[in-house]
Image (spheres, helix red, strand yellow):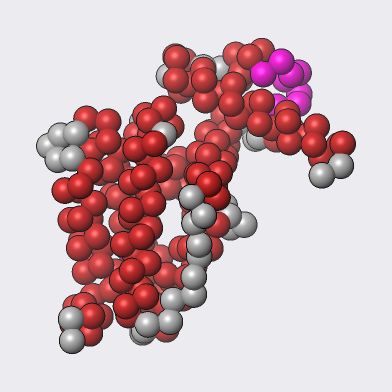
Amino acid sequence: MDKISKKKSEKYNSIIDSALELFEKKGLHLVSIDDIVKAAGIAKGTFYLYFHDKHDLVSKLILDKAEKYVNEISFEIKEIENDVEFDETLRSYIEYLCSFLENNRTLTMLIDKNINICVNAIFEATDSQLFEAYKEIKNYMVKCGTAESDFTVKFYLYVELTVAAICNAVLRERPYGVAEVKDNLYKIILNGIAGEKLIERLHE
């Protein structure tokens, strides 16, 4: 990384880290862009070189921390070629999400109050590992005969459900804890996305 790129990366990370710390202390809605740039030690104009607005910052913050986490745990995106691999992939992705939220409670609190921003970030960041994982699942389901438009809507809804349910389990542990929630989420999502035919083939 050259000096210019390194300096840009440092400023970007400074904004991200300062914002997360402020959100933790005051809550998203009580933190202004002025607060963030002051904490990061940058000019306000510099903020807009990296982010359109505060919501764009939150989206990128969530994605940035998630991407760093999957790199830390050696998250691998594998091409799905059969039903068993699809089943294992779905299970592992739910496990990864639970692990991420359990190990990043500050971020989980932020996501919990802004589920829509979190989910939209996953679907809009087309150059991220998370989006690549989504594409692998979609490609396999389309290959199995699912209409792409049907899959996209269903998957969006299930991601929203999954993130909200796990956040609640992690932060409040009621009415159910993470272990109960993730096992049932897996069954609900598998049935809803894959359908009965694929489930029958898995049990043959």
| Front residue (pair 204, 200) | 204
Q: Please state if 24 lies on the left or on the right of 125 as rendered.
A: left
Q: Please state if 8 lies on the left or on the right of 151 as rendered.
A: right
Numbered range of the magenta stretch: 40-47
Q: Position of residue 195 (x, y in %)?
A: 23, 75
Q: For residue 152, say whether it is visible.
A: yes
* Residue lying at 66% horizontally and 26% vertically, measured from the top left: 14
Q: For residue 110, say whether it is visible.
A: no
Q: Relative to 135, is 38 above or below?
A: above
114 in the magenta segment: no
Q: Residue furthest front?
A: 73
Q: Position of residue 95 (x, y in %)?
A: 33, 53
* Residue lying at 20% horizontally and 47% vertically, measured from the top left: 179
Main secondary-structure element of the magenta-colored stretch: helix
* Residue lying at 32% horizontally and 78% vertically, measured from the top left: 84
Q: Residue furthest left?
A: 175
Q: Please state if 29 lies on the left or on the right of 54 as rendered.
A: left
Q: Position of residue 111 (x, y in %)?
A: 40, 35
Q: Quadrant of residue 6?
A: top right
Q: Quadrant of residue 174?
A: top left
| Front residue (pair 196, 7) | 7
* Residue lying at 34% horizontally and 64% vertically, measured from the top left: 90
